Image (cartoon, rainbow, N blue to C red):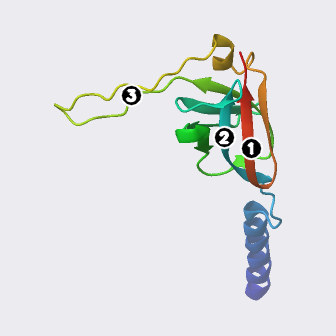
Amino acid sequence: MTRRMFGNGFVMVASVILFASGCGGSAKPAGTVMGKVTYDGQPLNAGSLNLISSMGSAAQAKIGDGGTFKIEGTLDAGEYKAYLSSPKPEPVAPGTKQKALEKFDVVPKCLDPNTSGAKVTVKTGENNVTIEFTK
């Protein structure tokens, strides 16, 4: 009788572990995002690119020379609204003069995800995109 209880208990514990760990892979489709940001057809060389989905996923990347950017990590696949934010001063060592910020002259509508009009569709895998902002 002891053996039978041990056998049933083992099966029950093993079932709970398998159920809790999720036997099937239910990972959401995701992709990496990199590319170029333009403003009125010209590369934007300063600021940050922000992406936000209707499901709450969000990411930010610093815009570099030639308008290039790269989101660190992956984003859930889907559609994202894109908007810009102004450059932030980089930290400097005490006693060191702060470097002047690069020119960032965009219209206010580009600073809001609901008015920028820019969108990005993230697909599974690598996404190399150009995101265009206009006046």
Marks 2/1 in contact by CB < 8 Å: the verdict is: yes
Give the quadrant of the C terminus.
Answer: top right
Q: Which mark is residue 89?
A: 3
| Residue hosting label 1 | 129
Q: Which mark is residue 76?
A: none
Q: CA distance from mark 3 to mark 1?
A: 27 Å
Marks 2/3 in contact by CB < 8 Å: the verdict is: no
Q: Amino acid at mark 1?
A: Val
Image location of residue 18, percent across then percent down: 77, 69
In the orientation shown, which residue stands out farthest toward the left? 95
Q: Which mark is residue 36?
A: 2
Image side of residue 101 versus residue 125, left or right: left
Q: Earlier in the sequence, mark 3 or mark 1?
A: 3
Q: Amino acid at mark 2?
A: Lys
At a point 71% along the width and 28% down the height, the residue shown is: 41
Tell which of 120 and 130 is nearer to you: 130
Give the quadrant of the N terminus.
Answer: bottom right
- Nearer the camera: disc 3 or disc 1: 1
Q: Earlier in the sequence, mark 2 or mark 3?
A: 2
Q: Earlier in the sequence, mark 2 or mark 1?
A: 2
| Residue 42 visible at all | yes
Binning the other alpha carbons within 10 Å of mark 1 as few (below 14), some (14 to 19) or many (20 upward) gives some
